[in-house]
Amino acid sequence: MIPERFPPPTQLDKPRDHCGIFGVFGHPQASQITYLGLHALQHRGQEGSGIVTCTGPAGAKPRFHSHKGFGLVNDIFKPESLFTDVLKGDSAIGHNRYSTAGASDNAANIQPLMVNYRGGNVAVSHNGNLTNFRGIRDTLQEKGTIFQTTSDTEIILHLIAQSREKDQIRQIIEALNRVEGAFSLTILTDTMLVAARDPRGVRPLAVGRLGDAFLVASETCAFDIVGAEYICDVNPGELLVFDRETLKSGVAKSFSLSPSGVVPRHCIFEYIYFSRPDSTIFNDSVDKVRRRLGKALAREHPTIPDNDDEKVVVINVPDSSNTATLGFVSESLKLGYKSKYEIGLIRSHYVGRTFILPAQGVRQSKVRTKFNTVRGVLKDKIVVIVDDSIVRGTTSKQLVKLIRDAGAREIHFRVTSPPVRYPCHYGMDFPDPGELIANVCDGDIEKIRRELGVDSLGYLSLGQLEESVPRDRGQDYCTACFSGDYPTSIEENGSKNERDG
Amino acid sequence: MIPERFPPPTQLDKPRDHCGIFGVFGHPQASQITYLGLHALQHRGQEGSGIVTCTGPAGAKPRFHSHKGFGLVNDIFKPESLFTDVLKGDSAIGHNRYSTAGASDNAANIQPLMVNYRGGNVAVSHNGNLTNFRGIRDTLQEKGTIFQTTSDTEIILHLIAQSREKDQIRQIIEALNRVEGAFSLTILTDTMLVAARDPRGVRPLAVGRLGDAFLVASETCAFDIVGAEYICDVNPGELLVFDRETLKSGVAKSFSLSPSGVVPRHCIFEYIYFSRPDSTIFNDSVDKVRRRLGKALAREHPTIPDNDDEKVVVINVPDSSNTATLGFVSESLKLGYKSKYEIGLIRSHYVGRTFILPAQGVRQSKVRTKFNTVRGVLKDKIVVIVDDSIVRGTTSKQLVKLIRDAGAREIHFRVTSPPVRYPCHYGMDFPDPGELIANVCDGDIEKIRRELGVDSLGYLSLGQLEESVPRDRGQDYCTACFSGDYPTSIEENGSKNERDG
Amino acid sequence: MIPERFPPPTQLDKPRDHCGIFGVFGHPQASQITYLGLHALQHRGQEGSGIVTCTGPAGAKPRFHSHKGFGLVNDIFKPESLFTDVLKGDSAIGHNRYSTAGASDNAANIQPLMVNYRGGNVAVSHNGNLTNFRGIRDTLQEKGTIFQTTSDTEIILHLIAQSREKDQIRQIIEALNRVEGAFSLTILTDTMLVAARDPRGVRPLAVGRLGDAFLVASETCAFDIVGAEYICDVNPGELLVFDRETLKSGVAKSFSLSPSGVVPRHCIFEYIYFSRPDSTIFNDSVDKVRRRLGKALAREHPTIPDNDDEKVVVINVPDSSNTATLGFVSESLKLGYKSKYEIGLIRSHYVGRTFILPAQGVRQSKVRTKFNTVRGVLKDKIVVIVDDSIVRGTTSKQLVKLIRDAGAREIHFRVTSPPVRYPCHYGMDFPDPGELIANVCDGDIEKIRRELGVDSLGYLSLGQLEESVPRDRGQDYCTACFSGDYPTSIEENGSKNERDG
Amino acid sequence: MIPERFPPPTQLDKPRDHCGIFGVFGHPQASQITYLGLHALQHRGQEGSGIVTCTGPAGAKPRFHSHKGFGLVNDIFKPESLFTDVLKGDSAIGHNRYSTAGASDNAANIQPLMVNYRGGNVAVSHNGNLTNFRGIRDTLQEKGTIFQTTSDTEIILHLIAQSREKDQIRQIIEALNRVEGAFSLTILTDTMLVAARDPRGVRPLAVGRLGDAFLVASETCAFDIVGAEYICDVNPGELLVFDRETLKSGVAKSFSLSPSGVVPRHCIFEYIYFSRPDSTIFNDSVDKVRRRLGKALAREHPTIPDNDDEKVVVINVPDSSNTATLGFVSESLKLGYKSKYEIGLIRSHYVGRTFILPAQGVRQSKVRTKFNTVRGVLKDKIVVIVDDSIVRGTTSKQLVKLIRDAGAREIHFRVTSPPVRYPCHYGMDFPDPGELIANVCDGDIEKIRRELGVDSLGYLSLGQLEESVPRDRGQDYCTACFSGDYPTSIEENGSKNERDG
């Protein structure tokens, strides 16, 4: 049923784990809650999903149950897996995997990974990317370790199992102290749910509460869908343990990972594009930040003054720039521009998010099936289009063509982020640098403008971007995809060997 | 594979055919174009789809090919059906069926219906509802006719076959002159594509052009997706014939159905809710009309003046009231209200349109999986929510609860249509009158307000609605679901016998 | 889900209905019994199956339920269709369809056909072939009748509906009196189960009893699987009605079809190959008749006398010639030949019956996956292989090659039927005459022998065949595929237009 | 898609690997050949199958490809996996897994297991059972090894990876020298195919040749299906290496496992029941041995002399006792009994082998769907039924009832093996001893006879069994399931902890 391809040792997957993770401890409907949580996190990964549950604690030996598959959450989990014994137990973790080449990919890589070692069963869901995984993998292989997946996540399991610590929590801490890069994790064992986040807190991870049960999720929208309450974030460098005692006391045990005291470097792209606007991440509302980006953009690259005010319309790219466009328009008005917000593009409800589709060819043909123009809104108008980011430029170019075809007189492109020029080593699946339009055009904005075929082009500057994101708690951000400034060291072949052929 | 249930003669389906139809004549990729057209019309019917193609004209006898199924267009049509000989031919018709009880329904009812009679093969796609079909069905059965479906559309095929006319076009005209009610049709025969619309033009039907080929579709968005040009509507009471000659001359033959000269009565609900905003129907842009509805509503039921202007936010219900809300906000500003447009509800990309889901129970549980609130936008605010219509009230009540839970201080509900109180006999699948909240509350707006749990409630009046829709070409509208004023006579048991048990 | 192709009017399917039919009246597990019955009759048709049930009789209006699909019975019917309400009711009919081109075929043709007419619901399962169906179809089409399938069975439904008789039984009788050829039928209506057989009784049809309920099946093995008792055959030209009264009285009503008094002409090939050896058909045990064929063959074409008796082995082709081979061996011993029965060919349990697979290409490649030789049994032996029939010769040639490869010294081929030379117009799906090896070789046995590559070849003569089948009740047989002597007249284009392209 | 359950460490699967294995080296159609080989070996395991191929050797780094699933070979492997790049490469191994609890089982356990370690990729297919695997697993876990499956086969991979040998062949030998019990293996690496067999040669393993390519299979019937030639067996305790050099020289490298010089102890049950009669295993034809068992049984427990010779019929249980029954009948005749061989039971072609179905409940209900009686053969007869073995007795009891219902006057049961009383620790999936009828009846034959409801019962004695199997090359047999005499030591909890709950 499941075709798998196993790469040779030197052609490992670029771990593509911009993913969504979830965990629940202490609820009789653990698998159903996880299912809904994964559904709310579907935008973080659409290639495949999995849920692992643990039966316990009453009397009998704990037992792990798992169900995984390729596709969307709603296609993988059906009543026969959710409302039967297939996924029984009162604790669970889940994972949504980022879209890659699909059917030809290795089914064994679908998370949560689940194994058995001397300490019992253990399963893990990972969002992020480990930057020193090739080195650790080589070392482990030299010692005689076998690998069943091509995922960086598997080394965490081996490090836990090979730890000489007696206590399972200590084993996990030791393992996590060995790995570098970005990791937000939910780990399920026979007796507990562990949530952990790398010292820089690159990826988000939040804790929620539903009655007595505890929930952990990449974004808070996964709590809202089940009516749970958002409590706090897992702190950067923190490891939280939820066990039977926690259920009684209402308090999770907290441990620190090393190095301690490093400045958090949150992924700034989570605010720009990846997270849902109705989520709170890094302790702040995505909606609020995204609105600020729109306002800052309006100040840097305002709309075009025109004698005939009626001729200027500002449109969003639904739904990714909806909120930022509102900020852009309100700030423009404040600045004295009379440009009007309009809905000029209609998004089909029946396709996924373009950014996430795997192949260049497919993406192109999907634009027409995803967007349509409202001619009455665009015809003879000076159109200002606000988008969140430009990566390859393929989608942008086609949108511009669609708008042009609808009769727009001029098109002015505004972007709420700087040009994307560098690979992400922390889990965002950008294409090869050679496919980034900002690189192809050597960072020359005029060249990009011509390439896109627009009348003007304005990117939010890195400075303005950095000023627009929250900093009131001393946090900092990873802006490496714009600046090339990586908060950790990167393995030699990290930037060369991006793709699983 | 396909379970079917066959009802007894007196328990016929309420024909639920608020559907989308498509046709193409003279294009080598007829099936692929139809597939994309149906994808663009997916919002008109999500229960099932089908495509019938005709091989021709070169030499060999024409042959019909068909592929149908339950579910979404993208699930039914795959490369193996679209890029192979399964659906070969240069003419095709397609159909999206409205969502009903799903798997338990009769597969034979999925359109296009395809049969063979003395005149050759003929297939038909129908959007609308025939109000005299029970009478005709009884008459036909008395004469010895057998029925293989429970669809009203089947009588059209029998009437064609039983016509004593020699000429196939005359047979079709004779058949259509016998039926009453609403019908927009695409009919495929061995030699031609026929498009026809009932004399009142209740449902939309447009003609497009792609190179030399002709296209017919319920809405023009189905032309945009393939880059085709919108030419004109099929006129109310018109029957258009596209054949080999048409391809050469570029001119379709036009015939008139009787009675001629009746005033068109377009379904006003197509403008309010059903059609896509990027479509042109009844010769006008849906977007433009919908905006006018929002403006009229703002004049009738303005937002709440408040001392603290910052406290009032106007939100849309994505995506069905997006455009109308913009109209509402701009008119409110013009009227001196300072209320701000905000995005307070986020719609998941991974579920279909609520209105279309079949069962009450499912709908309720789906609201949470479909919408989430943006707390920062709603907390402590006076929220004005603009929606297109209230039918059962179930979804509205739950949205109100979600918004209340997000901390809204007050909630004011505004609707761009009057209360829905009467069944539709022309193809809109409203629930039984006893389930309509406006009926349950005897049309008492204060009672509905209390039922919804909002601080104020304002419906657009029927008068204002009728003044807001285009009338410059002498057209009129069917407003029966609001007024009970049906443009045609309705069969006795039409309003009693709504459901297929 | 289901691709369908609709042929032009002059390229109708050669109706391929060598099928299995079943019916049950008055049992609460009607659908499950039908499922098991169809499973026992699987050898009669492997392309697709269907079950139609009728809910009744308690109070409410009767309602028909249907489930159909392509493939084997076990693949189509699952617990969710058999143990739920999908197929509820205490009466049911079922049908197994003969294998044809499979997925590309018209799903609408899968039986039972189910329609609604002025007399209520009616469904029909048919085994056989109507020889005057093109004429009747033309007449019906001229009168304005539409056809939804390409099956000859559909005309029976139209004839019933168009009958001017008031009484439903009379309608059915009138319809059946109009059709010619071979038909064994089960017909389900809102109130009764009807079983009928053409005046010549070409195909078998038996009546069984399970408690108070009545069963009807093509072969008695379908009774054994549910522990039911075989009562009698439906007589040639008889129509039996099972209704509520029958359940009380234990007596079915019997009617006669016309013409009455014709001599039964049973299909002799049912005894030779098609029926299961554990069945009773035409009032006699298939096993017993098949053994007699083997004995007669031994007398006509005995095994080879050899000095070294040990060298001669007689082998069967499992499982179709098992019983006949035993007869052949025992008679050979009686005649003084010392040849030994051996198992020289092993049949895989994981493929279907070769004769039934649709395409020439597939058949050839399947022989190796179906049979293997036992070398120790065949090496250096004089092998006498007994088979039931040779149609195309393809399988036989490959078997001969396999046996030769296993080291056989000589191969002597013996067949328990005469050469097949003429098409069957009564439901057996023989290939085009041009593909029959006996035709290709002009009936020259020596030529066929060379073609097969065997040392000697012996067919049972038509005379001996006719003497070996039961005649004690005055019955006669159709031997048209061997003799060209058809018991009814055949439509002009019957023999030309065999195939649905 | 694939539900998995992970047991706690102390509830490990009873490794159920009475399986079929295959391997091919040096053929461009490696995956297709493996597919056909697995199809021929389907009787050895019907729960699931898998194929792993290796791309090479031209230039590029070798790459492994895998496709696995639950179900029959024909359901798992389709043209899209066999005739595409999904399984490309010129070397491959495959595996059929024995039927267990099916869908609820752990998908990760389906073989071949495929991993990556410092020596490259390695995949393994295993038939047999390792008797010291729990001890080794515990030791490995103590050292920090994680387990992703519950299969004993996984320890072989860990032992290879953890070997300190530099040379891969030495690593494999070291690993295999550590494990005890029964193993026939095919191992695929980046550069070679390895075939190995435990020193006692409990399970069969044969080498074949197809052109220049080498094949390895559990039984020779897997060579016949592709027209390959059987060369020799892999000797007990031998490890054969096929690599690029082998293709040139035509000679595989042979290595010895320790301990060397132990007496082979072939599984005697392979001859009695498990292998196909057309296979050669342990250097001898299964057909020939099985015939001898029938003859020996006839001498020990002859048929009943009867005055009326015509009344005694000997029947087989198709197809497992076909050959043995022929031996029984011919020997009976030689001994002067006139009993006649008859076909009294008909086996449906549409179900699998009963012995292999997982649950007791299912088996019982399947007997009726699997066998039917030929009444004419059995009625009023003294029936001698020859079967290969009696395990639970459930099937036997029901067969006896079927035969009794068909009118048999007396039933005499004959079995070509002794009573089964002990668990198999070498890969045969017998039920718990408490479910074996011979144990339930304390080995009291009279009690078993009464339990089965037969008139007499005769088992082949262990002595006669041992005399009937080939011994001309000094080989011996494992008869532990009859005698309790195990050729190796068995782990403490081996016999207690049979089942995966």
Image (cartoon, coloured by chain):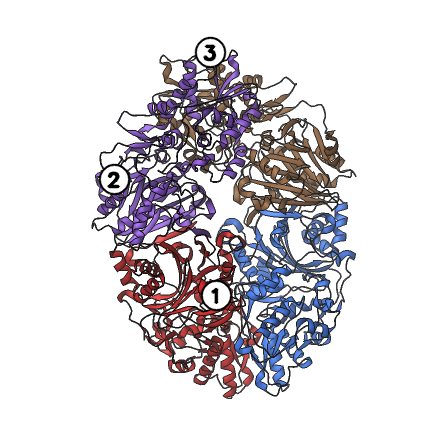
Chain colours: A blue, B red, C purple, D brown
Which mark, residue B248? Answer: 1
Confirm whether circles 2 and 1 share one chain.
Answer: no
Residue under pointer 3: D335
User: Where is residue C354 shown, x and y percent of the image?
Assistant: 47, 35
User: Where is residue A323 shown, x and y percent of the image?
Assistant: 59, 74
Q: How many labels, in total? A: 3
Confirm whether circles 1 and 3 share one chain.
Answer: no
Which mark, residue A276? Answer: none
Name the element at disc 3.
Answer: loop
Q: Give the class, few, some or many, for how many residues have Cα within 10 Å of label 1's Cα (few <14, many ≥20).
A: few
Residue under pointer 2: C240
Q: Specify the amino acid type for callout 1.
A: Lys
User: Where is residue D496 shown, x and y percent of the image?
Assistant: 57, 34
Question: Separation of disc 2 and disc 1 at Cα?
Answer: 60 Å
Left/right of residue D188 with respect to residue A82 in the rendered view: right
Confirm whether circles 2 and 3 share one chain.
Answer: no
B389 and C95: which is toward the camera? C95
Name the element at disc 2.
Answer: strand
